[in-house]
Every structure is written in structure tokens, then in C-alpha cells.
Image: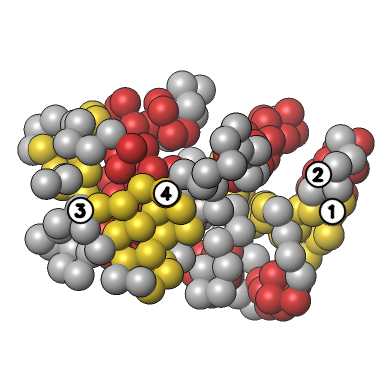
């Protein structure tokens, strides 16, 4: 199996050196960047399996880098933030990050998060030759190739946005609480709160709904949670 390729972005070279050494011990291929412009250039010209991206960077902030990467790639992005401020976490998710880790962190936690994301996005070997495709009205979800089409136009979703949509669409009209979605998609040991779910639902609606304020696919059951409406 080919080694997974990770881009590590942080202006603190000692932190980058430590992360790189630890990831290479687990047979990852690691490339590094020390400012936002360098990170963006590498992301444009290379294919990575995941990106560790610090928030506080010279030239371009991590938020700006994340937002611009999302214009051309769905690569999983884990934000690294030195602040305990919830706004940093929420902003990272708003700009398209899949996860975040607060500094100071344990390198074992970093590796566990990377492994969890890679495990979820790795194409599953089909048990049957038939591809698993979900369809509802003018939406088509290709589960094996992780692609979404609305009115025959492919929509670019992040890994987490796809997982949320796949879960809801697989179980149409079943209402999931925010807590249940957080547990199923992010895992029971995820340190974030239910606002993470709200941010991803909002971003998902902005991408798949003609009118996000009056959604036809992903609905809210007020006071309970979210569900995929299927007639």
C-alpha cells in the first residue's frame, strides 16, 4: 500500500520538525510549509491525503489558506490552533476545515485524528460489483466514489459534509439529534460540541440547496435535530 502524503503547515519550525518525525515513524510521507503562501502553492501543485494547518501563519492566515484550498480541493484539513477560543474552532469549520486540534497537543492525538479521517475517506472495497448509489429527486449520491450530483452538476463537499449527507440520505425521514450526529460522524471522543454539526449542516445546505433558507433535502425538526426529507 502506498504511503499517505501529509502536508504540515506551521511557522514554528520545532513543532513542524516534531510532527514530521513522528509521522514518518508511521510511514507517512511528509512535506512542510512555514507560511500561508507556501502552503497554498504546495496544495495547488501536489496531491495530499490530509493537511495539518496552523491558524496563525505569516502572509496568509490558516483560515485564508483553508478557504482558498476549498475552491479547488476537498482534501481533509485539520486546523491547529493555539487558542482555546471557540470562535477559532467555529471559524475553521466555517472556512471548510474537517477537524481541529488545540495546542498544546499530544502527537498521539494528532496521529489518531489523521488515521480516523483517512480511514473514513479511503474507498471501501465493494463487497458486490454493483456500485452503491443513492437517489432522491434531482440528487444522486455515489457512495463508493464519494461524489454528489444535484441536477447533474457535481457538488464539491468536504469529507465530513459528505458523511453527514450520506448518513441522512441512507436513512431518509429519520430525525437525528445534533448529539447523535456528532457521535456518529466525529466519534464519541471528539472534543467539540454540537455547534460543529450546525456549521456543517449550514455549509451543506449552502452547497446542495437552491434556497438554503427553505431547504428541500436536509430539514430541521425544531428542538430535536435534522433529517433528509424523501417524499
Determine the CA span between mark 2 and mark 4: 38 Å
Q: Nearer the viewer, mark 4 or mark 3?
A: 4
| Visible residue check, residue 50 | yes
Are circles 2 and 1 on residues that touch, CB within 8 Å? yes
Q: Earlier in the sequence, mark 2 or mark 3?
A: 2
Q: Which residue is mark 3?
A: 217
The circle drawn on residue 133 is 4
The circle drawn on residue 19 is 2
Q: Residues within 10 Å of mark 4 (few under 14, many from 20)?
A: some
Q: Residues within 10 Å of mark 1 (few under 14, many from 20)?
A: some
Question: Which residue is at a point 46% across and 53% down the rendered structure image?
Answer: 142
Q: Residues within 10 Å of mark 3 (few under 14, many from 20)?
A: many
Determine the CA span between mark 2 and mark 3: 41 Å
Determine the CA span between mark 1 and mark 4: 34 Å
Mark 3 lies on a secondary structure that is loop
| Visible residue check, residue 105 | no
Q: Position of residue 230 (x, y in %)?
A: 17, 45
Q: Position of residue 97 (x, y in %)?
A: 50, 55
Q: Which residue is mark 1?
A: 30
Amino acid at each position: 500500500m502506498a504511503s499517505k502524503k501529509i502536508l504540515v503547515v506551521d511557522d514554528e519550525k520545532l513543532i513542524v520538525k516534531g510532527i514530521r518525525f513522528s509521522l514518518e515513524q508511521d510511514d507517512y510521507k511528509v512535506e512542510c510549509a512555514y507560511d500561508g503562501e507556501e502552503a497554498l502553492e504546495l496544495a495547488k501543485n501536489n496531491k495530499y491525503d490530509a493537511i495539518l494547518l496552523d491558524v496563525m501563519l505569516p502572509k496568509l492566515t490558516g483560515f485564508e489558506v483553508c478557504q482558498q484550498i476549498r475552491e479547488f480541493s476537498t482534501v481533509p484539513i485539520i486546523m491547529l490552533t493555539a487558542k482555546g477560543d471557540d470562535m477559532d474552532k467555529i471559524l475553521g469549520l466555517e472556512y471548510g476545515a474537517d477537524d481541529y486540534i488545540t495546542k498544546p497537543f499530544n502527537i498521539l492525538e494528532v496521529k489518531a485524528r489523521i488515521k480516523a479521517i483517512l480511514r473514513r475517506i479511503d474507498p471501501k472495497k465493494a463487497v458486490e460489483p454493483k456500485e452503491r448509489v443513492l437517489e432522491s429527486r434531482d440528487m444522486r449520491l455515489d457512495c463508493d466514489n464519494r461524489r454528489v450530483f444535484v441536477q447533474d452538476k457535481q457538488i464539491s463537499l468536504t469529507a465530513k459534509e459528505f458523511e453527514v449527507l450520506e448518513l441522512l440520505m441512507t436513512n431518509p425521514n429519520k430525525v437525528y439529534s445534533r448529539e447523535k450526529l456528532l457521535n456518529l460522524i466525529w466519534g464519541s471522543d471528539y472534543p467539540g460540541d454540537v455547534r460543529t454539526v450546525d456549521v456543517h449542516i449550514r455549509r451543506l445546505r449552502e452547497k446542495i440547496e437552491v434556497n438554503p433558507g427553505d431547504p428541500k433535502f436536509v430539514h430541521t425538526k425544531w428542538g430535536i435535530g435534522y433529517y433528509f426529507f424523501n417524499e
